[in-house]
Image (cartoon, grey):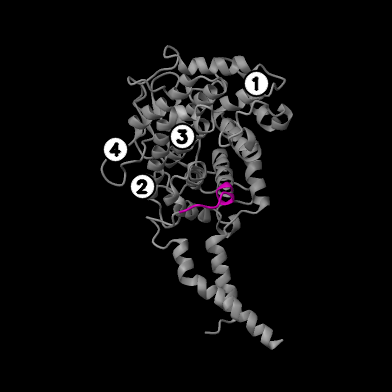
Amino acid sequence: MLVTLRQSVALVSFATHVFSQNLNDRTLQLVRARMNANSTASWEMGTRAQTLIEIDYKRVSVYSSTYLSPTPPSSASLEPVISIARDAVNSRTNDQLVRDGSAADPCSLGVAVLLGNWTNAPGANFVPAANDQLQLILDPSRTPRSPEGAISHRTEYAQLWSDFVYMVPPFLAYYGAVTSNKTLIAESVRQIELYRDALRSGESGPEENLWKHIVMKAPNGFNDLGYWSTGMGWAASGMLRVLGTIQNSPFSKDFKDEQSQLSMWIQEIQEGMFNFLPESGLFTNYVDQPNTFTDAASSAAIAASVYRLVTLTGDGTNNIQNAEKIRNAIYENNGQTHFDPDGWLIPVTNPYNYGEEGRYSPEGQAFVLQMDNAWKEWKAAGGKSNGSCPRAKRSHMAHWNRFGPWIWLGVIMTLIEYAVRL
């Protein structure tokens, strides 16, 4: 069979689409610029700091075995992160790192503040600020708790939000690791377990491992028992940070069972959500409600968690194909489909009113950057995958198995044809 040059180009183009959806550097720079300029809420600042650490300062990331190195880097080398912490510390008006109706969200800045102390950064009193926030979040007389002991996400009444898992447990675990306080590390895992017990669906069927968004009613009766996709992205990502903190600390052997639990709980969320992954490759705002709008932000967060878990532990390789499906969907047409000309990810949840579609989302920008970075690290580590794709009707590998030989045959025969003509 002789394949023409035009057919060969078309087939190679198809292969490129299947395997090589990427964002160019300019788009990634725009994504980062929008995140940097628009992260103003407490959790947005904390998420921005964490994203910069993961991408630009890997040595001090909890995903690195060197994050507890006895010799700190210079504070100047970490200035983009330290400046976020410095601004928060110097602006605080109470024991929170940022005054907020959320008890949890200000804790997202805790790691950056502790880095400021470790590097002896000038311009702020980092130690008192971090300690005040720690004591506040751990004091049941000042931060409400559930009857079981789960720390409230809210300051005025006990209420549990899935977002909490990204904000508080990583702060507790990191504080414990840098101060050799195993009690704090254990508490970080205990809080995750309490939240899982309270939020996990437990229903039989595909919803079994999904997490509710908000449980325990506010005084006005408000809660949200729906399976909010972004909330599960927050939870999986927060558990990963705790897992990395423990695994790369001197206390790893003391918490072997806890590390196994964390990996299992992360995979529960991932696989629970993949039960509902549409053919489009992007989740809807409430994962089990296809009539809600498409949300690229939560999709990026979940994909990032898959790449990160596989790279960190080797677990969850069965979810790689679905993560790739998400990444390829977000990067479609080299980003021209799901990024506007200014670099904003679209479509996204309104981060200030989670039931509505938003115009832009600073946290969504961070999730994209985290996904891109985790994907690149996964590839650099060998790109492990077991090749299974339970939800995809036709995986990328299946496409390759079917068309790959013809693609290369077409290319080779076209080259031979041109050589003969010459």
Are the two marked residues, 3 and 2, in contact with CB atoms closer than 8 angstroms? no
Is 384 in the magenta? yes
Sooner in the amino-acid sequence: mark 4 or mark 3: 4
Query: Looking at the image, is mark 4 or mark 1 nearer the viewer?
Result: 1
The spot of residue 5 in percent (x, y) is 61, 79
**As drawn, 150 above or below 271:** above
Task: Please tell me the numbered disc located at residue 117.
Answer: 1
- Residue type at numbered disc 3: Met
Task: Please tell me the numbered disc located at residue 65.
Answer: none
Instruction: Name the element at disc 2.
Output: loop
Q: Which residue is mark 3?
A: 239
Q: Farthest bottom residue?
A: 421
Which residue appears at 51% of the width and 70% of the height?
404
Q: Which residue is mark 4?
A: 202
Task: Please tell me the numbered disc located at residue 289.
Answer: 2
The spot of residue 176 in percent (x, y) is 52, 22
Instruction: Name the element at disc 4.
Output: loop
